[in-house]
Amino acid sequence: MQFRRLLTCPPAKLSEADHAPVGPGVFLLSDSDLTTYYYVEPCQTLRIAIGNLLRGGTSRRGGDSIKPRLAEHLGIAESRVTKYLADHCVVRWLQLDEGASHFAHFVTAILRPSLNE
């Protein structure tokens, strides 16, 4: 049921991260056509994690940036990734107080996002 809720959430541009909940949860980064899944991650604060993706390409504090992996996957220069994220990507999220990391593992196993491998 949670998987269905995540996939039916309305997609939001990364620049709209301030509309995301302040609490913990899981987010799914995909292209704006909702056909390609790039990244899934559990986080403690959805609003901050989603906002950091656009600013620095990293969502977890101290985590690796997804910029190099996305640049390689798309075949573009790393300097163009931020613009690509802003123009062509959306995020959907599900706020979860418990079990976010388990749910993120499940979503990753089902959707196989290209940057989680």
Image (cartoon, rainbow, N blue to C red):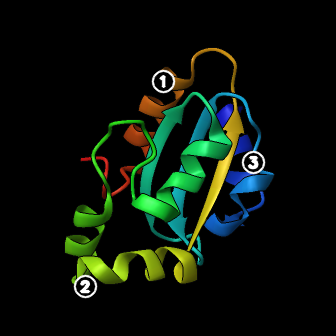
Q: Which residue is mark 3?
A: 20
- As drawn, 37 above or below 33: above
Q: Earlier in the sequence, mark 2 or mark 3?
A: 3
Name the disc covering residue 76, or none: 2
The residue most toward the top is 98
Q: Earlier in the sequence, mark 3 or mark 1?
A: 3
Q: Residue at x 25, y 76 (%)?
A: 78
Nearest to the observer: residue 97 or residue 22: 22
Q: Is residue 3 left or right of residue 28?
A: right
**Residue 62, horizontal then vertical, whole percent:** 33, 36
Q: Earlier in the sequence, mark 1 or mark 2?
A: 2
Label 3: which secondary element: loop
For the residue carrying disc 1, how many other residues have a C-alpha within 10 Å: few (<14), some (14-19), or many (20+)? some
Q: Which residue is mark 1?
A: 101
For the residue carrying disc 3, how many other residues have a C-alpha within 10 Å: few (<14), some (14-19), or many (20+)? many
**Residue 32, horizontal then vertical, whole percent:** 59, 76
Label 2: which secondary element: loop
| Amino acid on which disc 1 is placed | Ser
For the residue carrying disc 2, how many other residues have a C-alpha within 10 Å: few (<14), some (14-19), or many (20+)? few
